[in-house]
Image (cartoon, rainbow, N blue to C red):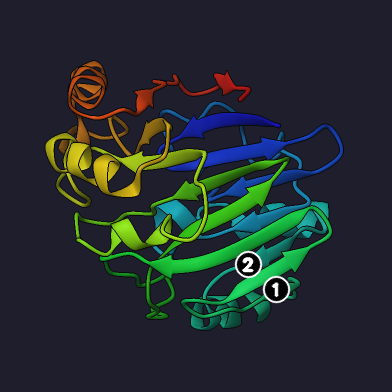
Amino acid sequence: MELRFLGQSAFSLSDGDTTVLIDPFLTGNPKAAVTADEVDATAILLTHGHADHLGDTVAIAKRTGATVLAIVELAGEIAEEGVSVVDPNLGGTVTFDWGTVKLVPAWHTSTTPKGTISTPAGLVIEFGGQTIYHLGDTCLFSDLQLVGRNRQLDIALVPIGGHYTMDRHDAVEAVRLVGAPTVVPCHYDTFPPIETDAQAFKADVESQTSSKVVVLAPGETLTP
């Protein structure tokens, strides 16, 4: 399994046959590693409906035939575009032929550019023998510790930019609560309000917890 950081909160997971995209905000993203026309997708997973996460979902899904997974209200809006969707709610798990996706709580807000209001979520993804937890745009809250209570989390994708999400200081405590051995920071440096020091985050996490941080530049990959 190869995990590739595409910029902001966008990632791709690939095993050579299947490609799963997460929050594909590419058009209008100054840090995007690829364009929306360049990515392949078997499935697209969304944490919430803000423009910097919903991004190019509909265009990519129409071009590739990918199925979109999003919380029920957001999925309903996307389905109106003629895209195939699955629509779980918090706590729901969807099984695909390549793995599973579970929606878990994230403290944030979510309104699409069209005005659809929905509940934001984190994504617990089983793919390629790994369990990846994308925390979405959450702030720090104590229930993060529950997500890995009954499963081993291998990789956590953690927002650190502050302003719209938790900052790098709160994110250290989030890493402690989540307990994943490998952490990849995201949602930082795309725009001035969320500029931060990812290397300082790495140093703090590795001195205060047992987790290791892999800082990926957009376009770089991690192969667990």
Badge 1 is on which residue? 85
| Cβ atoms under marks 2 and 1 closer than 8 Å | yes
Residue 189: percent from left, percent from top: 28, 29
Residue at screen point 20% across, 61% down = 142
Q: Amino acid at mark 2?
A: Leu
Image spot of residue 182 (x, y percent): 44, 30
Q: Badge 2, how many Cα within 10 Å: few under 14, some, many 20+? A: many
Tell me the amino acid under the disc marked 1: Val
Q: Give the x, y percent position of residue 76.
A: 59, 83
Please identify the residue farthest to the front as the structure is shown.
150
Find disc 2 in the rendering and name its residue: 69
Q: Residues within 10 Å of mark 1 (few under 14, many from 20)?
A: many
- Horizontally, is 79 left or right of 199 in the view? right
Residue beneath the point at 42% across and 80% down: 116
- Height in image: 154 above or below 74? above
Position above or below: 73 against 123: below
Task: Give the quarter of the image for residue 19.
Answer: top right
Q: Residue at x 35, y 42 (%)?
A: 179
Rounded to the nearest angstrom, the CA distance separating label 2 from label 1 is: 6 Å
Which label's residue is closer to the chain start, 2 or 1?
A: 2
Q: Which mark is residue 72?
A: none
Q: Point out residue 113 in the picture as x, y percentages from the top left corner.
A: 41, 68
Residue 48 seen from this side: yes
Give 156 or 46, whichever is nearer the viewer.
Answer: 156
| Disc 2 secondary structure class | strand
